[in-house]
Amino acid sequence: MPVEPLTPILDPTPNLDAARDSFDAYLARFEPADRVVALHDSDADGVTAGVVWQRALERLGYTAIERIIPDRERNAWSPAVRAG
């Protein structure tokens, strides 16, 4: 199913209400049974963010969530790829 691009919320001073609106607009694009992939970094804050994201989606009823921790040697963050 094609996904329409999100309309950016152009607010120079974002606040909690703006963040909630953006999050709601993002989630409105998916059904709870849709597959959701959470790609996050492998450092402490990246893993924490990935788990928080997964748990939040689970609480909202999403059931097909996959967390992916990238392999630093084979992805865009690797020093070899950045140098090349």
Image: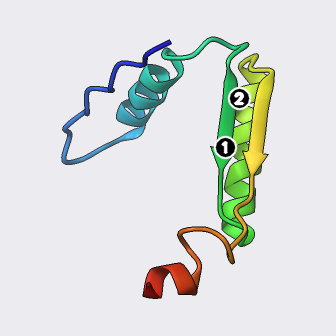
Question: Please, what secondary structure does the residue beneath circle 1 have?
Answer: strand
Kindly identify the residue that appears in the image at 57 percent across and 16 percent down.
30
Residue extending furthest toward the front: 84
Task: Give the amino acid at mark 2.
Answer: Leu
Which residue is labeled 2 in the image?
Answer: 57
Q: Earlier in the sequence, mark 1 or mark 2?
A: 1
In this picture, residue 79 sits left or right of residue 57: left
Picture quadrant of residue 22? top left
Foreground: disc 1 or disc 2: 1
Q: Residues within 10 Å of mark 1 (few under 14, many from 20)?
A: some
Picture quadrant of residue 83? bottom left
What scheme was used to colour the molecule? Answer: rainbow
Q: Say above or below: 42 vs 58.
A: below
Between 40 and 53, the one nearer to me in the picture: 40
Q: Give percent across and percent down for residue 58.
A: 78, 26
Residue 38's label in the rendered image is: 1
Residue 80's label in the rendered image is: none
Query: Which quadrant holds the C terminus?
Result: bottom left
Between 75 and 10, the one nearer to me in the picture: 75
Question: Please, what secondary structure does the residue beneath circle 2 have?
Answer: helix
Kindly identify the residue that appears in the image at 70 percent across and 24 percent down.
35
Q: Say above or below: 36 vs 24.
A: below
